[in-house]
């Protein structure tokens, strides 16, 4: 036989005296391109936050990284391992591995998104408890990508990204 891919051959025989069935098989492995697994965790992050690339290449003798020289993901790497990155923009990483049966390339992308807004919200009163109708000054500041702010609950309506407001809680 001359298989072009890994193949399993099975032979089934019947014993002419007892009628018993005997089965055996043999697998012929053909060296093909390496089987490469390559992924990032997390796949989405905020600019500059750590992420990790995980990879393995079954049937490979060598692997080469490319796509992000600023994170040292560039040049020869082991055939199995992981590598830390901290992208500042959406980045696609590449891994090419070679072995006796050829080469294979995989890529993975880490999506970098804007950070979520930060809200600092408190009141200026040193008291933990207030009497109904006692005034309390609230203050807030919102940073980051925000399009609008809306008050809900005991106060209502649109608010600016930073400010103060005196409220009088009811019972």
Image: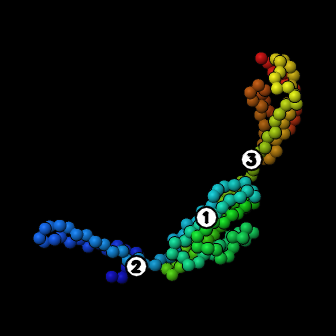
- Which numbered disc, 1 or 3, marks the residue closer to the eye? 1
Residue name at image x 36 percent, y 74 percent: 27
Q: Nearer the viewer, residue 63 or 115?
A: 63
Secondary structure under tag 2 reads: loop
Q: Quadrant of residue 82?
A: bottom right
Q: Which residue is mark 2?
A: 4
Residue 20, given in percent of the width and then of the height, sits at: 17, 67
Left or right of 171 in this view: 136: right
Q: Which residue is mark 3?
A: 116
What numbered label is drawn on residue 54?
1
Residue 120, given in percent of the width and then of the height, sits at: 81, 39
Q: Residues within 10 Å of mark 3 (few under 14, many from 20)?
A: few
What numbered label is drawn on residue 18?
none
Left or right of 100 in this view: 135: right
Q: Tell me whether the residue at label 3 lies in contact with that at label 2, contact meaning CB atoms closer than 8 angstroms.
A: no
Residue 70, given in percent of the width and then of the height, sits at: 75, 69
Q: Nearer the viewer, residue 155 or 7?
A: 7
Q: Residue 103: tell me if it is visible.
A: no
Residue name at image x 59 percent, y 67 percent: 55
Q: Residue 9: tell me if it is visible.
A: yes
Figure check: 141 above or below 77: above
Q: Residues within 10 Å of mark 1 (few under 14, many from 20)?
A: some
């Amino acid at each position: 036989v001359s298989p072009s891919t890994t193949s399993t051959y099975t032979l089934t025989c019947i014993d002419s005296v007892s009628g018993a069935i005997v089965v055996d098989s043999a697998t012929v492995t053909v060296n093909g391109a390496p089987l490469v697994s390559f992924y990032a965790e997390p796949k989405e992050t905020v600019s500059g936050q750590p992420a990790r690339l995980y990879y393995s290449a079954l049937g490979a003798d060598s692997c080469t990284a490319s796509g992000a020289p600023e994170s040292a993901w560039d040049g020869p790497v082991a055939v199995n391992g992981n590598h830390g990155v901290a992208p500042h923009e959406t980045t696609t990483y590449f891994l090419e591995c070679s072995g006796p049966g050829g080469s294979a390339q995989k890529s993975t992308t880490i999506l970098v998104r804007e950070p979520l807004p930060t809200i600092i919200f408190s009141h200026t009163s040193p008291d933990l408890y207030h009497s109904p109708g006692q005034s309390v000054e609230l203050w807030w500041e919102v940073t980051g990508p925000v399009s609008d702010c809306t008050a809900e609950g005991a106060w209502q309506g649109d608010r600016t990204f930073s400010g103060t407001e005196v409220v009088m809680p009811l019972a």
